[in-house]
Structure formats: structure tokens, C-alpha cells
Amino acid sequence: MSDEERATWDRRYREGGYLPRPSPFSLLEEWIDRLPRGRALDVACGGGRNALFLAAHGYEVDAVDGSPEALRLAEEQASTHELSVHWIDADLDDYVPPHEGYAVIVNCFYLNRPLLGRLVDALADDGYIFIEQHLRTPLPIPGNRDWRMEPNELLRTLSGLRIVSYEEAIGKDEDPGRDRDIATVRAVACKGSGGF
């Protein structure tokens, strides 16, 4: 991430132009009681919604983002709720997870194809990865096509894992203050049997 990109994200968070979502990724919330416990990683954590949710459920959480301002806001939320999270300021273009053996990894709306492969490698046996990305579609959906996955691309990316949930859909944006349609791909996959 360039210094200019980092400054742009910091400004968005500082000025309220990018409001953190108040609730965690819905698939993570749906699956939380079925997941193995242990260490978790939230990649491109932004305001920390998934990291805080995981910490509240007893995980030892590493949360990484390229915006120091986002991490500051997330850390304030953790302090308010008396939750412990290891916040990591890192350039996600070159990021390598600090540990192998994560029980849970979450990556929402940050597309970095080489990083996705490194995340799969960082999963523990029977660990789960939760991914939500923007999806390319011929429909007039706003946004940059370069930041979107092709249909079925995420299935190919996760081909070495057991896919336990997968959906490509058009729906309403869940971001606060945004009333627009978005195209997304969402997946849950596990390394090994995942208890099935």
C-alpha cells in the first residue's frame, strides 16, 4: 500500500467517510458456535467488527489493517468493551500472517489474490476461513472492477479446502449510510474435515 493510499484510508476513517459496520460478518456470526477455539486472524480489519466479535467469544485475536486510524478506532472499541486484541499495522500488499495454525481467519472486502493463498496456508488443521469479496457482474453495480472477483474465482482459490458454504449474490449494501446494490461472493471453507 502506498503512502498515498494509507493517507486516503486514514482520512476516510478520521472524517467519518467510512463508517465501521456495527455487527460482524453475518456468516461468522452464524457459524461461531460451531467453530474450533484458539487463535484467530482478521485481515483488513478496519474498525474491528470481526476482531471484536471473535475476542468476545474467547479467541486470541490478531487483527491487521493498513490504516493506523482504523486501528486506533478499533482499539478504542476494544477498550470500551474490555476486549483484548493484538492490533497490527501492516502493508497488506506484502503481509505474511505471523503464525501458522489459526483456528479462524476472516477477510472481508479486501481483495489481494496472493494474500488469499497465504491465508489458506496459515489455517490450522480443521481451521475455518471466512471470505466476503465484491463480485464482477454485467449488471450496473457501482465500484471498481479491479477490486472484484470473477464468478467462481473464489471457489478455485479455495480448491484445496472443504467448501462448507458458498454464495454469489446481488443484494443491498450493509454499510451504514449506503443505500445501493452490491454484488458479493461469500464463502466458508475448512482445512480438513472441519468436524463433518
Image (tube, helix red, strand yellow):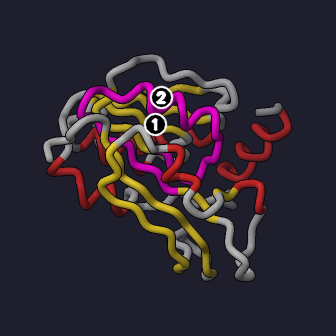
Read off the residue under disc 2.
87
Q: Earlier in the sequence, mark 2 or mark 1?
A: 1
State the SS at label 1: helix
Read off the residue under disc 1.
75
Amino acid under disc 1: Glu
Residue lying at 20% horizontally and 39% vertically, measured from the top left: 193
Residue lying at 21% horizontally and 41% vertically, measured from the top left: 194
Amino acid under disc 2: Trp
At label 1, counting other C-alpha atoms closer than 10 Å, the crowd grade (few under 14, some 14-19, many 20 or more) is: many
User: Which quarter of the image is occupied by the N terminus?
Assistant: top right
Q: Position of residue 30 (x, y in %)?
A: 25, 61
Do callouts 2 and 1 mark residues in contact (Cβ within 8 Å)?
Answer: yes
Residue 106 badge: none
Please state the extent of the stretch shown in magenta in the rendering.
107-132
At label 2, counting other C-alpha atoms closer than 10 Å, the crowd grade (few under 14, some 14-19, many 20 or more) is: many
Front residue of this view, candidates 64 and 36: 36
Residue 139 is a magenta residue = no
Q: Can residue 66 be spotted in the picture? A: yes
Residue lying at 28% horizontally and 58% vertically, measured from the top left: 29
